[in-house]
Image (cartoon, rainbow, N blue to C red):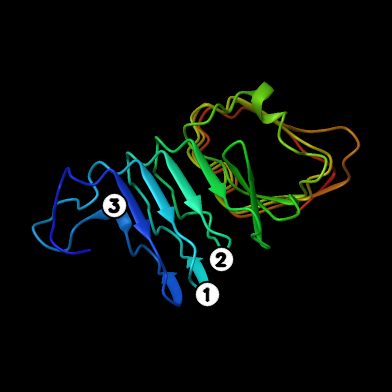
Amino acid sequence: FGECCPGKWKQSFFKPNNKHNLKFKSFHSMNCCHRNKSVFLNVVTVTFTEGGEAVAFGGGAFANCAKIKTVYLPKTVKTFHSGVFSGCPALTGVVVAEGNPYFTSENGVLYDNNKTTILFYPKALDADPETLAKLPWDTITTIDDSVFRKQPKITSFVIPKGVSVIGANAFYECVNLTSVSYEQGGTSLSIGVGAFGYCSSLTDVRLPAYTS
C-alpha cells in the first residue's frame, strides 16, 4: 500500500483484479512492515469494490483494527472466517452487496445466504437478551465459531430450540455471561471446544439431555 502514512487514511478500498485472497493475518493490526507504524491508523470504513472474480477472507485478516466501524463486502466474497474482524471493538456492522450467493447481512450481522448460520456479530452492537432475541432464530441452526467471542455485553443467553450446533469458542471469554439455558422443545445440541471457555461469571448452565 505504498509508503507509511499514519493518520491519513480514513477509508480503504480494495479492488481485486482477479482472485484477491486475504491470507491468515495478512493485515493483522494494520501494521506497516517498516518503522512499525500503522498505515491505516484512522481507518473507519473498509470497502471491497466489485470487479474481481472472487474474494476470500482468511482468519484474522483485519484483527485488532481498533477504529474500523463499517465493512462493505462485494457480491464476489465467497469465503469468510469468523476471526477476520476479531478485536475490532468499534465495528458496528458488515454490509453485503445484493446478489452475493453465499452471504447476507441484516442490521450489521453476517449470515450465510439462507440465514441458517450466524457467522459474525460485531462487537459494538448491543447484545442484551432483548436484542439477541430479535435475531432470525426461526431459521438459524448454527452459531459459528467465535461469533460472540469476548462479547462483554452478553449477560445471559437462551439457546433457541432450533439451534443444533454451537461452534468452537462461540462464547469464549464472555466475562459477564452468567447463565445459559436451552429453550424448551429442543432435543439435541453439539457444542464445540471452548464454546464457553473462560466465561468467569457463568454459574447457571442448563442444557438438553443429549449434548455432545
Quarter occupied by the C terminus: bottom right
- The kind of residue on which mark 2 rests is Thr
Report crowding for label 2: few under 14, some 14 to 19, many 20 or more residues within 10 A (C-alpha).
Answer: many
Name which quarter of the figure residue 204 lies in.
top right
Report crowding for label 1: few under 14, some 14 to 19, many 20 or more residues within 10 A (C-alpha).
Answer: few
Residue drawn 83% across the image and 44% down it: 162
Residue 17 position in % (x across, y down)? 41, 74
Of residues 40 and 60, which is closer to you in this image? 40
How far apart are labels 2 and 3 at the CA level?
A: 24 Å
Mark number, residue 76: 2
Element type at marker 2? loop
Where 42 falls versus 80 (above or below)?
A: above
Q: Considering only order in the chain, which callout, 1 or 2, is on the residue closer to the N terminus?
A: 1
| Residue 153 visible from this viewpoint | yes
Q: How many marks?
A: 3
Residue drawn 53% across the image and 72% down it: 54
Report crowding for label 3: few under 14, some 14 to 19, many 20 or more residues within 10 A (C-alpha).
Answer: many
Q: Is residue 123 left or right of residue 63?
A: right
- The kind of residue on which mark 1 rests is Glu
2 vs 3, front mark: 2
Name which quarter of the figure residue 139 lies in.
top right
Of residues 84 and 113, which is closer to you in this image? 113
Residue 145 position in % (x across, y down)? 59, 53
How far apart are labels 3 and 1 at the CA level?
A: 27 Å
Residue indicated by mark 3:
29
| Residue 204 visible from this viewpoint | no
Residue indicated by mark 1:
53
Q: Is residue 148 left or right of residue 33?
A: right
Q: Are marks 2 and 1 in contact (CB under 8 Å)?
A: yes
- The kind of residue on which mark 3 rests is Ser
